[in-house]
Image (cartoon, coloured by chain):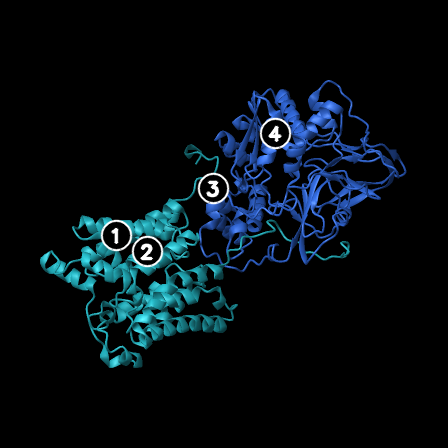
Amino acid sequence: MSDSRVQQHIVGPSPHITSKATCSGIMLWVVAALAPAAIWAIVNMGLVAVQLLVVTIGVAIGTEAAWNAIARRPQTILDGSALVTGLLLALALPPRTPWWMAAVGAFIAIALGKMVFGGLGHNLFNPALVGRAFVALSWAGVLAGVENRGWFRTLADVSAEGYDTISGATRLAVATADRAASGGYGFDLVAQYEPLLLKNLEGSLGEISAALLILGGAVLIIKGIIDWRIPAGYIGTMGIVSWAFGSDPVFHVLAGGVLLGAFFMATDYVSSPMSKKGRLIYGIGCGLFNALGRFVGPMPESTTFAILFMNGLAPLIDRMTRPRVFGVVKSDE
Amino acid sequence: MGGVHPPGHKERTAASAVERAPVPERLVVPLSQHLGAPCAPLVGKGDRVERGQMIGDVDAMVSAPVHSPVSGVVTEVGVTLTAGGQRVAAVTIEPDAPQDLGSFVPVEDTGDARARVRAAGIVGMGGATFPSVVKLSPPKGMAIDTVILNGCECEPFLTCDHRLMLEEPEHVVAGARHIRDIVGASRVIIGLEDNKPDAAAALRKVAGSDIEVTELPTMYPQGAEKQLIYALLKKEVPHGKLPAATGALVHNVATAAAIADALEHGRPLMERIVTVTGAVARPGNYRVLFGTLVSDLIEHAGGFVGDVERVIAGGPMTGQALGTLEVPIAKGSSGIVALEKGVAARAISDDQPCIRCGRCPEVCPMGLEPYILATYSGRRMWDAVAARSVIDCIECGACSYVCPTKRPLLQLIRVGKSAAMSKGAK
């Protein structure tokens, strides 16, 4: 038996117990939820996918580590957020994006998307989307998937020679062009459900399988890591607006970056609202601007800018949707 | 609304019948075991005292006299550290060798129930230690129609109220009726969480048709006064008003039992049930004389096992971490919980960022935004914290509990709250 009179104990303020949730634990769940899609992309695309993932994740973590070292701040790479940013950026880029372009994107994501604001928790915009937006605006052709920038071809390009992914237009781009030209579609949208759900080699890496993204998103919702209101508002609005424009709602949810955006990008804690009501409004806003970009604007791939725009509105939404304090009635205020 | 579901850890002691802890070699009885004016000693060194004899009192509205829990000799009138970390006057008593705990000096019956409750030194035994007589005397014009007994015991680890309701339900029910009659209420509800079905059944068996026994979802802080009133009556205590404004008066079940003892037998408050649990060899529910040192109680419970990191007086959500075990058990000591490494919260550091996950506003039972309050407090923006209703914080700790980056939210909010209150903010 120990002598209770000489024990030394920690004194601290209550509460003296805490939940098991940790920042890195949450980040690892997000990585786990994205892993099936990333692995399926590697299985189908091979080295080209591995290269993209390694470059974005490596540069993202490296940039954060270097920033902290230069700024003499405590090292933060173990919180897992740079890993998530790198992974998300890879999944949001076409698989044959030249490696240096992906590296620039990852550097911008971490440096200008997060660290300049003071690091995790202080950024206004989703870092991965900042990186993707930078790449998309700087080298628009690559992300639209319509131009083959063959002179920057990488080693991996060679091994992926069989794919027409980098030079061919995506189903979504074709559908959008058809619609603009004739008001109708030159192919059956319903017939595209199956490839979009299970195995799609067009567009960005993460578009490989809508089913795996939905699975990952469902896991995060069930684990209480993300709030269902954001993807529900997002996807619901996307579907309704597509339908209102006389198009196929399911195709427009499955095609392009909508699912990756709704489950994994828009739900980024730091850049989304805090209140439940606010999150629903924000999700609806993301879906609305994404759909308008597709049907009214010139961009079939408007996911990035729809979410970045709503990121900017998140603080305003928080202000508008503050919770009611217990015991306070409207007339008290 | 709000709330968290920490692991209960109650299984260690929920089935342990209440046992009397031994009379220690000396008792250090604090003269301030309540919220309010401290008592002045009524005895001096060398005096003989009887069990139940009043040894401290003060002429103040918000106060409660203190009685000797044993017959014996006063060896010192000095100062002790309390579980809460304050230095207060205390009477040290050496008990008579064979101690007769069956008898005591009863509190005189003057025919005034409120006066007798005060003279018996009864305070809120849920932990707040607010003198019961004050709550039994609501301000003029504030009619009480419903008496609520709080048997929620929503704090993890604690089972003292559970065992009391299970072993002495008639005692609790009698106290409820006394309180109802004193304040002139018509309705009595005993509210408890649904993790204690045996206690609910025991209460129902003796309750009769005049007393409702209501089981509520197990959730922390279900037993917080405002949350309990809302759960049972669907009435919110208006901002800035007393809970009595809803017509409800809440007393802890142990307080009710003590009131019954005082009014029926003239028994002053001299002991209570304390749950001693966590990393101790023989966890249990012990009936402990006030003034028994925590170290004596831990020894009686077989000592610590494993790597004990924090020892808590009260529950782990709202209790106090003890720096020394040489502090006495008092009227508000519901439990002594030894938290092992891994169970105890890590030492706090305030340099972790808020990642805006949204968990703290979701769990706040008061509808506050803890992350904003904590940030403003950290920046010493006192007007801003006041404007965000910081004084409504009930300090339940649910925000700190859920925070994934383990920010010391409640501690920062406490700083902001005291600053806002001292500036007289509304």
How far apart are labels 1 and 4 at the CA level?
55 Å
Q: Which mark lies nearer to you, 4 or 2? A: 4
In the image: residue B273, left or right of residue B250 = right
What residue is disc 3 on? B367
- Viewer-closest of A153 and B369: A153
The amino acid type of the residue labelled 3 equals: Gly
In the image, residue B127 lies at what x, y percent?
A: 65, 39
Task: Choose top left, top right, bottom left or bottom right for residue B226.
Answer: top right
Task: Choose top left, top right, bottom left or bottom right for residue A300.
Answer: bottom left
Label number found at residue B203: 4
Residue B65 in view: yes
Q: Secondary structure at mark 1?
A: helix
In the image, residue B263 lies at what x, y percent?
A: 72, 23
In the image: residue A190, left or right of residue B155 = left
Q: Secondary structure at mark 3?
A: loop
Q: Which mark lies nearer to you, 3 or 4? A: 4
- The hue used for chain B is blue
What residue is disc 2 on? A262
- The hue used for chain A is cyan
How far apart are labels 3 and 4 at the CA level?
33 Å
How far apart are labels 4 and 2 at the CA level?
51 Å
In the image, residue B389 lies at what x, y percent?
A: 50, 41
